Amino acid sequence: MSKPILDVDAVRAFVTIVDLKSFTKAAEALGTTQGAISVKLKRLETRLGHHLIERTPRWVRLSAQGAVFLNAAREFLTAHDRAAAALSSEQRHFRLGIAQHVAGPETPTLLAMLYERDPGLTIEVRLDESRDLLSAFDNSELDAVIVRQEDDHRDGEDIGPEHFGWFAAPDFYHREGEPLRLAALAPCCGVRDIATQSLDDAGIAWVEVFVGGGHAAVMAAVSAGLAVAALSCRLAPSDTVEVSRRFDLPELPSSRIMLHSKLTDQRSRDALRTIAAAYREHRASMHRTLEKQL
């Protein structure tokens, strides 16, 4: 019995659907339509003789046969991409800047996805303050930057929301009638300005008891129980808790994460589109988790 000949695009569609748990997001990541993604998956299932993915209007998940096939599918794509890259003499670089207050626990996974998609790409990543990254981007020292919306008002690609909350150590104590003790970045920080304005609008007295020179310092102060801080829900230390309800603090407005890019070659843009789609899914997943905890 002859073995089925696999189509690379169809296998890539299958793996992308699984990774992003969505036909729509997979189509976006691969630069095609949801209908085309469905056709590719159906073609792959027909060739293999197995149903690989189960879907309803609410969820997408692997079938038993799909779970068996998944690792082999990933290895197939990796071997294909490495073989294709080996035939290219062009040494290509991708220089990505990620703002320190944006880079989160998903960053290593996203970089791994970028490498897996194009092993011939040399990846340079710079983590820095937004203003320094945007200056480097304007000077063509970076090919793409990921920053918050308020950091730069030029047009860019919206890759998802950023939600904020009030975080403190579990044993943090606030005496009623006294000003709320705050930890924050330097006065030029946009989140600090939004947080203090929200407190002022709500008529809540506050006093800054810790000013950090970086996000790590502020998070350390919060974990130590020194103060409350307005932090990204993704980046808040795991040993802290959201305390807006406990202390009746005002809701903080959300921001957006923006991708600014100067990439022009198709292979780099395809890889970046995959990362953008994964960024959106990761943030949506984090938000769903936070809603369950509140």
Image (cartoon, helix red, strand yellow):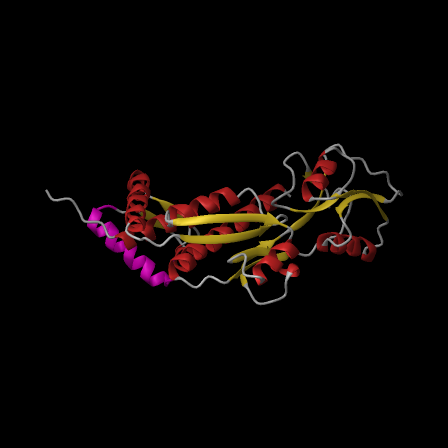
- x then y, percent, for residue 53: 33, 48
Query: Quadrant location of residue 256?
Result: bottom right
Task: Kindly identify the residue that appears in the image at 44 percent across and 53 percent down.
Answer: 93
* Of residues 137 and 217, the one drawn nearer to the viewer in this rendering: 137
Q: Is residue 122 left or right of residue 136?
A: left
- x then y, percent, for residue 136: 59, 57
> Is any atom of residue 148 visible in this view?
no
Magenta segment main secondary structure: helix
Total labels drawn: 0
Tell me which segment is drawn in magenta.
Answer: 30-50
> Is any atom of residue 270 visible in this view?
yes
* Of residues 163 and 154, the one drawn nearer to the viewer in this rendering: 154
Q: Is residue 108 left or right of residue 204?
A: left
Task: Kindly identify the residue that appears in the image at 71 percent across and 53 percent down.
Answer: 191
Task: Kindly identify the residue that appears in the image at 20 percent across and 50 percent down.
Answer: 47
Instruction: Decide: is 176 above or below 59.
Output: above
Quadrant of the drawing holding the N terminus: top left
Query: Quadrant location of residue 225?
Result: top right
Task: Verify whether residue 47 appears in magenta.
Answer: yes
Task: Verify whether residue 106 appears in magenta.
Answer: no
Q: Is residue 160 left or right of residue 63?
A: right
